[in-house]
Image (tube, helix red, strand yellow):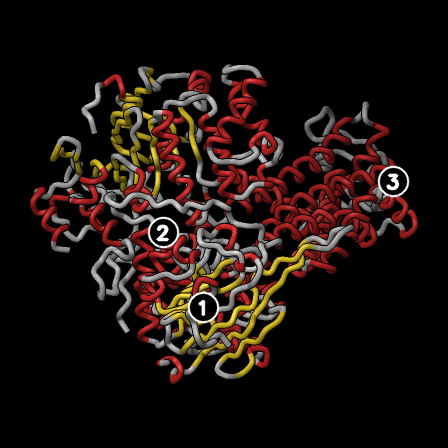
Amino acid sequence: MEQNNQKAALQVRDLSVTFSLGKKLFGPSSKLHAVNGVSLDVFRGEFLSIVGESGCGKSTFAKVLLGLQKPTSGAIDLNGRPLASYSRLEIARQIQPVFQDPYSSLNPRKSVAANVALPLIVGKGEGSADIRGSVQKALDLVGLSRKHAGAYPNQLSGGQRQRVAIARALITRPGILICDEPTSALDVSVQAQILNLLQNLGRELNITCIFISHDLSVVKHMSKRVAVMYLGRIVELGAAEDVFNRPRHPYTKMLIGSILPADPGKKLSIPTNDGGFPDPTNPPPGCHFSPRCDQAMEVCSKVKPDLLRDEAVEVACHLYSGTSTQRLAS
Amino acid sequence: MASAPTATNTQEMDYPSPWQNAWERSKTHIGLQIGFSIVLLAALAAIFAPLIAPADPYAQSLTSRLLPAVWQPNGSWDHILGTDAYGRDVLSRLLYGTQVTMIVGFGAAVVSGIVGSVLGILGGYFGGKVDAVVIFLINVKLAMPGVLIALSLVSIFGGSLISITVILALLFWDRFAVVARTATQQVCANEYIAAAECVGASRTWIIFREILPNIANQIIIIGSLEMAIAILVEAALSFLGLGIQPPTPSWGILVSEARAFMFLKPHLIVIPGMAIFILVIGINLLGDGIRDVTAPQGRN
Amino acid sequence: MTSSPASETVLDVKNLNVYIKTAVGPLQATKDVSFQVRRGETLAIVGESGCGKTITSLALMGLLPKAAFVQAESCNFAGTELQGLTRSQLSRIRGKSMSMIFQDPMTSLNPVYTIGDQLAEVYVKHGMGNKRAARERAIMLLERVGIKNAAERLSYYPHQLSGGLRQRVVIAMALMCGPQLIIADEPTTALDVTVQARTLALLGELQREFGLALILITHDLGIVASMADRVAVMYAGCVVEAATTEELFRSPLHPYTQGLMRCIPGRHKAGDSHLHTIPGMVPSLVEIRPGCVFQNRCAMAIERCGGSDIELRDVEEAHSFRCIMPQAELASSWLHS
């Protein structure tokens, strides 16, 4: 594999996050497996997308990587060392987030410069002389002018705010950027500006980017590699080209079929089997997708499929487990 | 690295700072101006009472009892607002009373504001067990008959300026706690708190630098309301004889002392009553005004 | 599209202007917006945030905030002139023959009443029948929008349903009184992608079945392409281009429409990894200059664009746009992009 000679920036092994919901007086308390046994390598400098619908665990996964959420079990290695062995500030220097809502990700009581300088101030102490210069460089990087440094978030548009948030994330030059739906709150024309910016920055600064989104057309455009998540598990993982051109998992097919093409010639294709999104606190046994799946077999509702290699991609589906020969997931 | 396309080829305007904005807005905010003038006037009166008071507020004079005010028949400029039943100058007592009123009102609001806000922020930020304790304390406070307890505390600890201030502060912290807790929870739901956590900011940093500036506005509003209420309660306690002890001039005591002559000399009770009324309104106008001019604009 | 007689026009809006009163004087939120919707037809109003599409729909429903006022040449709904109606007259039409579907089903249903109560309320309030009739119609419609065990679900509260099902309830509620026109404002923006496709398909089916006129307000050109018969593109309060869907996607003329279409990921040639962008941002109402509303972001802008207001020009029977450039030049700029 070509990826073997690349170094993994992040190695995630069998990661699970479980929330226990509402302690009931009688009966067992219900548990939500937000992330359920996820294993994934993120290679240095790559642009990896994680797609899925709400409730699939992609945001919880991002929170774990950012250190905002403790995993219930599993291991994460950052540059070959367990993430837990890093101090808070060390992680901060290597992994930074860009959040979804630029209206809530900046402190409204601080100027743009103060918002952007936050990682430096917290990391080094306020006295540092080069803070001004660094803020200026970071603003240049994201295409904002000097004038914006003194502005306050509410004086800026959504797109400008998202640029400020990116500048803040980049000011310490982290190796890894985690973007959680960075454009879903923005207009189409502004979205294009931000996507181009992220792509440029990723290339120029050689940043590893984990891009979390529900928008498949954005993901298809942006990423080299895609992981599709459903109810806490990765169901398909592979190069974006392979996943989009020849989706294997029925859920991936369903997602791709739901893209509305901006082309009036093509009519809406409607997913047929309507089981609806299952209750995440009580997911169906075996393959979580089996009740909604057209091609479900008997085994699907009994045995959990493993993520196995099928030609170019890895897929967790019983339809492909027969054809595959070797196990590569772990 | 000039790769990034600029976001701003059309918008080259200046961005005024929030202080400039607040200043601009306060220029047209009449409520704020009125409130500010009233409070400023009261504060100046309190500070400079010894200089501007025409007479000693404690000096009794049996020969000049219940003299009329200057606009009444036989009034004189020696005693502009007349004298009370002990022959003391009412204007001087009113000016010195401003000291007591302002100290008690402001002191009670600040002390209760600090206690309540600390509890509320801790509960809202940490949640879980800390929050449970805070909620329990608030509930206990709400379940107690506040004024009765204040009355009994005053009768135990006496009516000195400090004990009245502290007792009033104990009466009022709960509203600060409730508001600070809710506001903190709302602020914590914002992504900039998560962003601060992601850069490794300490809890102290997050509380003082991220949360506090964003809830300060609400706390100031509650502070102005509570200050006004504290002034009223202090007056009521003094009126009942359980507040500041005579002969110290507080506005409540002035009202209380004038009660016996309510029908003979109504101005003795109306003047301190009006003073309380105007100051309370002024404080409320000031609080509302501060909120109006410092609130960041909405999304657009 | 058949050349339909005027009687089939359900809504005919001519030169709708909405102003918002502010401290510095009235701001114009929409400018001379005109469109028609016929029976059984879907009109998409597409644009970015702040373009005035939501304000337009609120103006039609009479739901504008107090600070706003409307001036229009005419606003004819099924033979009734809406302008000059009192609030109570308007509320008799609203929810009955003209109903609205909002973006977020969580906030458009009242959490403290059951679904059955909320469905019945609309029906009874508009004098369509008694509670029993309302219940029967509610069950019928819930089943029609694909909710199983409809009779049982009537006693559910909104939070007991998923987002997709809630939006179906909202759709059923919009249909309770047999409306002629439904205005759907971003009806699927809050929903997941797989749910969105199904909800849109349902909306399309119901529209054909009930012969509704549908105004679909959206920012998503994918939704426009798969749902609409005709499209009006709005920018900064103006309709900058209007055409049939096929015509608009085949040859968009206005530079803004062209820019919007080039922004969509996946539309450009393979190997070209950069998305087209429209520089700058949507102007706020205070910043709008005389002349073309798009001039400061337009790559083709010339001095004349800043002159007088641009008139809507017709190029074909159902295609009009608001730009001073010659049509041929605009069309070739699209082909060579």
What residue sits right under mark 3 in the picture?
B241
Q: Nearer the viewer, mark 2 or mark 3?
A: 2
Q: Nearer the viewer, mark 1 or mark 2?
A: 1
Q: Nearer the viewer, residue A256 or C283?
A: A256
Q: Nearer the viewer, residue A326 or A126?
A: A326
What residue sits right under mark 1 in the picture?
A322
What residue sits right under mark 2 in the picture?
A257
Check the image and name the residue furthest to the right.
Answer: B156
Q: Is residue A316 above or below residue C138?
A: below
Left or right of C304, for residue A108? right
Q: CA distance from mark 1 to mark 2?
A: 25 Å
- Residue B246 is situated, as x and y percent measured from the top left of the image, at 86, 44
Label 3 element class: loop
Q: Is residue A317 above or below residue B31?
A: below
Badge 3: few (under 14), some or many (20 or more) residues near its Cα, within 10 Å? some
Query: Of label 1 and label 2, which has the lower sequence position?
Result: 2
